[in-house]
Image (tube, rainbow, N blue to C red):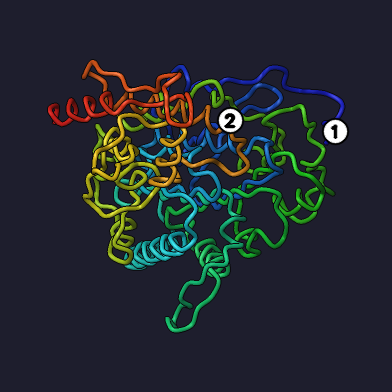
Amino acid sequence: MDMANANPFGKPFISPLVDEPVRQDAWGRGILIGFNRRGEPVHLKLAHVMVLLGGASRTGKGMLLRNLICGLGLDPRVNIRLCAGAKPGEHRGYAKVCATFFGRRPRRVVALLDAMLAEAYRREEKLEDQARAKFSERDLDEFPLEVLILDEFSEYITATELVPRPGDDEKMMKAGDRIAEQVEKLAAFAAALNITVLLSTQDPDAATIPRKFKTNSNARVATRTRSATQTNAILADGATGAGLRAHDIPQELKGAAIVDIDGADGELIRSAFIEDEHYDGAEPLITAGYDLRTSLGRAPGQFADRVEEWLIAHTGETSAAGGPTGSGRPGKPGAAARRLVEILLDAFTVGAAGTPADRVKAADVRLHLAAVDPDRWGPNEGEEPAAYESRIGGELAAALAAELDGTGLVVKPKGGVRFDTGKASGYMRADVEAAVNAIRIAR
């Protein structure tokens, strides 16, 4: 496959869902992930498959996942379970269509995989009772398609936190080793039960992809890799010898990948584009998916979810739709999420006389929010301070505006506020208190 001397794609392909976020079919047609060199759409079918996605950093894995998750959100027959291994803040916009969503937390991944295995055994028993080998599309109403996405999987498989060894709770083992065992076990039999596991990994090698999972994965996607070894680690041993050379994808060909899936064996594609830098182009798609699911009683919290019920029973916390705060932090079921303006009010320091300060620096507000909810408000790995400050400023302004919609109030930092240490950008307590009172009246 000679790709180095020409760009076969020209300009990027905008996802058609951006203009028309219509209901999707993950089982039959598959979810659109990109277009081939002839401009034909390429879909990933998720019936009876295990999926492996990998490549070097900043080569388009995130955009491929963006296409996939937005499409899955628009298929109400799918339960999306998303575990963000490295940057949960990048994924929290997907939370409201996710039956399960949380960030990092290897121990909770262990618990979730145990819950998935319990559901797999329940479904397997149903098939045995019916003397059948596998579920079909007609079973999706009773047994929805479970799609478990373990993003940045290398962060999980290398996790050193200790968890109980199965069968002997007094002995411990590394969470990463346990996760590898669980993933291999699911891959061995769960595909026939309407359960799909997708592993997404960066800079893969033989140690970061469980061997039995790779053997049982029958849908593989490789963005540009750094070497033939990494290409073979994703696509298959000997892939490079068969001309599937993901390490030869030109660096300037953003979002390109080699797919080895049903209907597109060994084909070069370019992922469809959904804006992710200047604004959140996925938000309207996720909202459309949420509205569709809500109309059918299939939004998180509207249906009996055995996996989340298992997690609540064994951990005491839920992560449905990102947990009580929607940020990817698990919490107690039914716990009322505090309003952002109420959390903001706590950022004002209290003096010796018990009187709160009348102003607080915007920088101190960022520190306070990051301490309260690091998954939502903390810096991403490797994020420069200036980029973090700009990103959080924009996200905080948008979140406050949404929370205060209809009140006629605006809470935003003022420039040049005087503090003991000089002038800085800051919030005024009177503004925040007025917003808190307005929301309480609205309640």
Identified at 46% across, 27% down, the residue is: 393
Q: Is disc 1 placed on a helix, strand or loop? A: loop
Q: Between residues 97 and 356, which one lies in front from this camera angle?
A: 356
> Horizontally, is 284 left or right of 317 in the view?
right
Q: Nearer the viewer, mark 1 or mark 2?
A: 2
Measured Cα–Cα span from mark 1 to mark 2: 38 Å
Quadrant for the N terminus, please. top right
- The residue at which mark 2 appears reads as 387
Q: Residues within 10 Å of mark 1 (few under 14, many from 20)?
A: few
> Horizontally, is 109 left or right of 412 in the view?
right
Residue 430, position in %: x, y? 25, 25
Identified at 49% across, 35% down, the residue is: 29
Identified at 46% across, 17% down, the residue is: 19
- The residue at which mark 1 appears reads as 2
Residue 204, position in %: x, y? 70, 53
Identified at 24% across, 47% down, the residue is: 303
Q: Between residues 65 and 40, which one lies in front from this camera angle?
A: 65
Q: Between residues 161 and 322, which one lies in front from this camera angle?
A: 161
> Horizontally, is 321 left or right of 199 in the view?
left
Q: Is disc 2 placed on a helix, strand or loop? A: helix
Q: Quadrant of residue 263?
A: top right
| First reached walking from the N terminus: tag 1 or tag 2 | 1
> Horizontally, is 27 left or right of 244 in the view?
left
Q: From what the image shows, is residue 203 above or below residue 170?
A: above
Residue type, mark 1 in image: Asp
Residue 132, position in %: x, y? 39, 62
Residue type, mark 2 in image: Ala
Q: Between residues 245 and 342, which one lies in front from this camera angle?
A: 342
Residue 331, position in %: x, y? 31, 53
Quadrant for the C terminus, please. top left
